[in-house]
Amino acid sequence: MRCTSGERYQAGSFPFGRPGNDINHLRSRTPMNMYKKPLPQINDLNAPYWEGAKLKELRLQKCRNCGRFSAEPVRLCMSCGQDAMEWVKASGRGKIWSFGIFHKSYFPSFAEEIPYNVVVVELEEGPRVYSNIVGVPQEEIKMDMPVIAYFDAVTEDVTLVKFQR
Ligand SMILES: [Zn+2]
């Protein structure tokens, strides 16, 4: 069975979803919000992704030179090395490539959701991304299950891309 160490990733906030220490500046922008989980760090490189998410668009970078998509924002194409990456709207469709159900909380803010899932979705365009499945009982999550993007506006500034059946 394919397996990944998904617990190292903050669920649902790919492509820069690893729990970071420097998140207070994001929290301070949404003082009235009750969202307590780690938030992504938005920068000039990944901003188009997060702007798209707020518009309920899943955006990916695609190389104008070789046509390859990138799962994580990059300045140069990881395939051909050209400075030719552009943001395009993805279909939002994919299938579950790997998943895990977590029974231990690595952050206090996740404790109330145990058990929770972390999945790797293989997008129609090719890249694989870490996320969560929402609205599906944990026991029904299966390999190769077709899924479609679900946009979860967790704060005024951040919409996380999750997936649903
Ligand atoms: Zn390329």
Image (tube, rainbow, N blue to C red):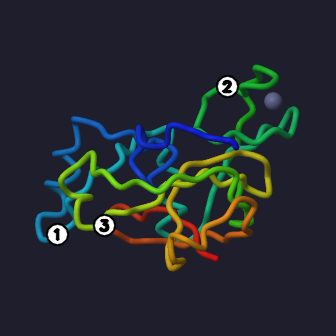
Quadrant of the frame with the C terminus: bottom right
Residue receiving disc 1: 34
Task: Looking at the image, tell me whether mark 3 or mark 1 is earlier in sequence order.
Answer: 1
Residue bearing mark 2:
76
Seen at 11% across and 64% down, the residue is 31
Secondary element at tag 2: loop
**Distance of mark 2 from mark 3, alpha carbons?**
38 Å
Residue 33 vertical placement versus 60 (above, below): below
Would you place residue 59 above or below residue 1 in this image? Answer: below
Residue 120, horizontal then vertical, whole percent: 61, 50
- Which kind of residue does numbered mark 1 sit on? Met
User: Of the residues under marks 2 and 3, which one precedes in the sequence?
Assistant: 2
Q: Which one is closest to the eye, mark 2 or mark 3?
A: 3
Question: Which quarter of the frame holds ligand 1?
Answer: top right
- Whole-Å distance between the Cαs marked 1 and 2? 37 Å
Q: Type of residue at label 3?
A: Glu
Q: Quadrant of the N terminus?
A: top right
Mark-to-mark CA distance, 3 and 1:
15 Å
- Secondary structure state at the residue bearing disc 1: loop
Residue 30 image offset from top left, x and y in percent: 18, 63
Residue 113's disc is: 3
Bin the neighbour count of mark 3 within 10 Å (Cα to Cα): few under 14, some 14-19, many 20 and up.
few
